[in-house]
Amino acid sequence: DVRTGYGRSEVIHGVSIEVPVDGVAAVMGHNGAGKTTLLRAAVGLLKCTGGKVLFNGDDITKLRPSARVSRGLAYVPQGQQSFGQLTTAEN
């Protein structure tokens, strides 16, 4: 159950998500619901204050973002950094 936030403000508390291999997941919610915060914690841009981030069964909670990318985990916010000539899956 991941916990994270900004400063003393805990934004995400007790969240668990599981996506099967080759699966696709959508994180949806109202503005300010914590979607971006959750994804930033998953890719290591925010430190988790509790819980674990597992990827392919491995605990990657303490890995730097670059190490998570080398394992195949990435985050492209708002489509601003996507490549127009590639399909959604390729991006």
Image (tube, grey):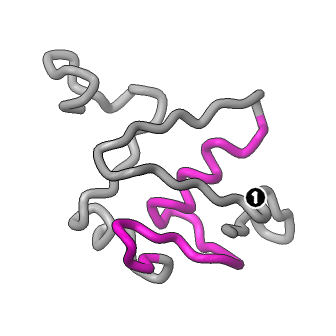
- The verdict on residue 6 being magenta is no
Label 1 crowd bin: few (<14), some (14–19), many (20+), radius 10 Å: many
Report the amino acid beneath label 1: Ile
- The verdict on residue 52 being magenta is yes
Q: Position of residue 8 (x, y in %)?
A: 85, 71
| Residue shown at 28% from the left, 61% from the top | 69
Q: Specify whether 79 is left or right of 33.
A: left
Q: Which residues are magenta?
A: 32-60
Q: Quadrant of the C terminus?
A: top left
- Counting labels gives 1
Residue labelled with disc 1: 12
| Residue shown at 78% from the left, 37% from the top | 32
Q: Is residue 58 above or below residue 43?
A: below
Q: Quadrant of the N terminus?
A: bottom right
User: Can you name the residue that lies furthest to the right here?
Assistant: 9
User: Can you name the residue that lies furthest to the top here?
Assistant: 85
Q: Is residue 11 above or below residue 46?
A: above
Q: Is residue 2 above or below residue 59?
A: above
The quadrant in which residue 7 appears is bottom right
Q: Is residue 51 above or below residue 11?
A: below
The quadrant in which residue 9 appears is bottom right
Q: Nearer the viewer, residue 5 or 3?
A: 3
The quadrant in which residue 2 appears is bottom right
| Residue shown at 77% from the left, 39% from the top | 33
| Residue shown at 36% from the left, 41% from the top | 23
